Image (cartoon, rainbow, N blue to C red):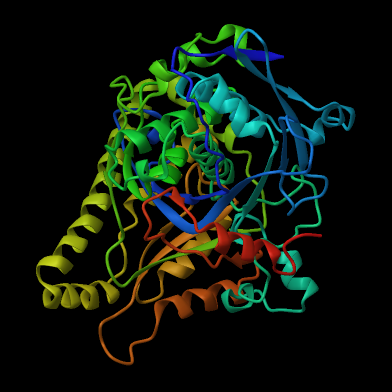
Amino acid sequence: MSSRSNSSNPEPAVVERAPPTAISAPGKVLLAGGYLVLDPKYSGVVVSTSARFYTFIKERIDGHAASQKIVVRSPQFLSAAWSYQAVFTKNGTVGLVPSVENSLLGSERKNKFVQLALERVLFLAIEKVGYQSLKVATDQGLEIIIVGDNDFYSQRNQLSERGLPNVIASLAQIPRFAYTDCSLADVHKTGLGSSAALITSLVTALMIHFKVISATDLSDDPKSPGKAFVHNVAQYVHCLAQGKVGSGFDVSSATFGSQLYTRFAPEVLQPLMGEQASNVPSKLQPFLIGTNASWNQRIQPFKLPPQTSLMLADVDAGTDTPAAVGRVLSWKKSDPQKASDLWTQLGASNDQLAAALSNLTALHTKNPAAYSAAVDRLCGQPPKQVIRGHMREMGRLSQVPIEPPEQTRLLDACLARNGVIGGGVPGAGGYDAIWILTLTPSKVNAAAPTAQVEGVWTTWKEMNVSPLSCGESMERGVRVENVETVLEWLKKPGYVH
């Protein structure tokens, strides 16, 4: 058992019981900055999605006082339930012990992400609110339900079972949080950053439920100490569960929403990267608190221009992203001059894309008439594809299929339609997905570019292209949800097997 001792915080005479907590966090699409976002010299353009992960926490109230049992369920999957015991000792420490049934049923029943989130937030909570408050908050036990919007997972089987065509309109006929009829390990993900959205929603919900922060701390301001605290803890847990300190753009987007992102220095997390509690400093809060200036990421809020639509599609193939990243970094190390030259050019092109989109948004605010004229002009022009060219060259040099020929042909067909202003393979690239940006013309009776793109997808034969229903999120990252609304969603048919 790992454990953590009480802080010097004074214990309250009376501890109020926490009401249920509901939190959600969005997925992400990295439009520009794949691979480069690992390097703090470069930035990435990250759009958060309207597809979100939800965490709901309530006391179990099962008649067994002082049980301290925490049950986590993800009912969209087969056998996706994990139970733990929060253990409070007489010398003022708290620890987390997985229940015996978790290990007896093998690795399928272990969930490192969930376990580390619970354990490390318990450690933070005893530092922040004290032994007695945390003990009361868990003495009835907790039930935690985690669900993700359907777009995080391929819906091909759902559409097929219902006899529905593989088009965007059909996705609305699938129940929310649809049951996948498979294990968590076997589900086909769509590359929207499910693990980062899950961890951000779970960590935030736990921090609010245990009163480490309050719901009002989730300000939209990227410099808000409360939201920065959530970000830092989520980054820590996510990196710890993955076994490495990644770029962090996915957790940052889940926390703050769409942004131009420049990574934090990995050294800030190195002292905390031991999975065993005995290898972790006695206090986590000084490392993770939102006012710690060692967290030096740069986050510039971003949004797509008006009349712009982000379209996403799941391509029924597979890409081993960690392996692709490893091979690109190996090439960069073996040919540093050529890699540096290419990354400099690609970084400049990424910055130009970000500036062009931001300038369009500013033009709409300053002069709507001029913006409408610019939109109509752009809708009739072929889009620039410099970034795609650089990405393909990186793929050629590193022998990694960053934009495979099959994806090139699909993207070229989409980009040939009027009103399509950009497109590519998100993040590290490969066969998993594509993104398309369209501008809707201001002219009356102009053909909708989204319909033209969907027409390409539905008739494409070389690969199985399945649209997603989500687009850009207008929300600023992680947010508090109405508990009653989430409860109603969870009661609807189709949510659970």
Q: Nearer the viewer, residue 430 or 142?
A: 142
Q: Which residue is farthest front?
A: 13
How many numbered discs? 0
Can residue 334 be seen here? The reply is: no
Q: Is residue 77 shown left or right of residue 225?
A: right
Q: Is residue 100 left or right of residue 264?
A: right
Q: Quadrant of the N terminus?
A: top right
In the image, farthest residue toward the bottom: 445
Residues 270 and 15: in front is: 15
In the rendered structure, the answer to whether residue 480 lies left or right of residue 387 reads right
Is residue 47 placed above or below 445 in the rendered structure? above
Q: What residue appears at the point 42 percent right and 29 percent down from the top-left corner? A: 232
Quarter occupied by residue 363:
bottom left
Report whether 490 appears left or right of 474.
right
From where the camera sits, is residue 305 visible? yes
Towards the viewer: 478 or 15: 15
* x and y percentages locating residue 472 in the rendered image: 41, 61
Task: List x then y, in percent, for residue 131.
Answer: 56, 19
Indicate the quadrant where residue 300 lies: top left
Identify the image quadrant of the C terminus.
Answer: bottom right
